[in-house]
Image (cartoon, rainbow, N blue to C red):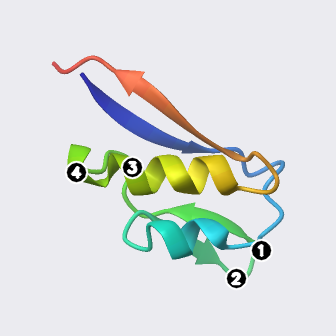
Amino acid sequence: MSYRVVADLEICQGHQLCQGEAPDVFGFDEDADVVEILNEHPDESRRSDVAAAVKYCPAFALSIEEVEDV
């Protein structure tokens, strides 16, 4: 099983803390002032950093969805 990173842009407040945890997964759209997902399906080795980004998002705008491998 793998995972997918999801961002709710409606509630993102642009704190950018996620970038500190996983800069290869999360970027920032300065024009829209919201997170940008750079890698929707990061490698399993990045899961702990992505999970930390999700956990510490002040707006609770990030989540991890489990997806079945095809």
The Cα atoms of the two marked residues, 3 and 4, are separated by 7 Å
**Residue 18 versus residue 47 in the image, above or below:** below
| The disc label shown at residue 48, or none | 3
Q: Is residue 27 visible?
A: no
The numbered mark at residue 33 is: 1
Using the numbered discs, state the Cα–Cα distance from disc 1 to disc 2 in whole angstroms.
5 Å
Residue type at numbered disc 2: Glu
Quadrant containing the N terminus in the rendered view = top left
User: SS class of the residue under badge 3?
Assistant: helix
CA gap between label 2 and label 4 equals 28 Å
- Residue, x 16% and y 18% (percent of image)? 70
What's the residue at 41%, 63% (across, down)? Answer: 25
Q: Picture quarter containing residue 44?
A: top left
Q: CA distance from mark 2 to mark 3?
A: 26 Å
Instruction: Provide the secondary structure element on which disc 1 rests.
Output: loop
Looking at the image, is mark 2 or mark 3 earlier in the sequence? Answer: 2
- Looking at the image, can residue 68 be seen? yes
Q: SS of the residue at dot 4? A: helix
Where residue 4 sits: x, y (%)? 41, 37
Q: Which mark is residue 45?
A: 4
Q: Residues within 10 Å of mark 1 (few under 14, many from 20)?
A: some
Q: Could you tell me if the residues under marks 2 and 4 are in contact, i.e. CB atoms within 8 Å? A: no
- As shown in the figure, which amino acid type bears the numbered disc 4? Ser
Q: Circle 3: is it few (<14), some (14-19), or many (20+) Cα within 10 Å?
A: few
